[in-house]
Image: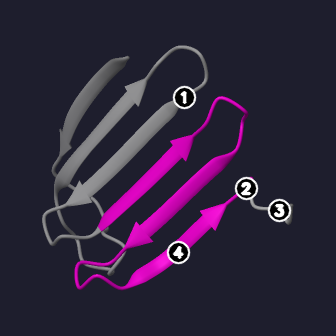
Amino acid sequence: MVGTKTHFTQGIAPCGRPAEGDRCRDDDDSGLIIDDVVWACGCRQTRHVFHDGSVRVQTVRHDGKILADEHSGDHEA
């Protein structure tokens, strides 16, 4: 897996505050991508793209409240 970490100085966190933060991205070159953004205020957004093409995006505010939790692969079995 190849990973990168990038610091950004300007961005708007999910809580609406301007904040700096870090983005970490891991990629296995076979379709798996893990993209994690953490802002200085504590907000976080995680995006996973799986080998089958399904995607999960979760956004959590700095106080722990889940703002979004989306799964493209969700279905009834």
Nearer to us: label 2 or label 3: 3
Name the residue carrying label 2.
Answer: 72
Q: Quadrant of residue 25?
A: top left
Which amino acid type corresponds to the residue marked 2 in the rendered image?
Answer: Ser
Nearer to us: label 3 or label 1: 3
Spatial distance from mark 2 to mark 1, Cα to Cα? 15 Å
Name the residue carrying label 4.
Answer: 68
Which span is picked out in magenta?
44-73
Q: At x 23% / y 78%, what residue is drawn?
A: 62
Q: Earlier in the sequence, mark 2 or mark 1?
A: 1
Percent coordinates x, y for residue 48 in the rendering: 52, 44
Q: Nearer the viewer, residue 42 or 77?
A: 77
Instruction: Assess whether residue 56 is covered by the magenta stretch.
Output: yes
Q: Which mark is residue 62?
A: none
Spatial distance from mark 3 to mark 4, Cα to Cα? 18 Å
Percent coordinates x, y for residue 4 in the rendering: 27, 25
Q: Earlier in the sequence, mark 3 or mark 4?
A: 4
Percent coordinates x, y for residue 32 in the rendering: 54, 28
Q: Quadrant of residue 12?
A: bottom left
Name the residue carrying label 1.
Answer: 32
Badge 2: how crowded within 10 Å, few (<14), some, or many (20+)?
few
Q: Is residue 61 left or right of residue 10?
A: right
Which residue in the rendered view is the most extreme toward the right?
77
Badge 4: how crowded within 10 Å, few (<14), some, or many (20+)?
few
Q: Nearer the viewer, residue 6 or 77?
A: 77
Which amino acid type corresponds to the residue marked 4 in the rendered image?
Answer: Ala
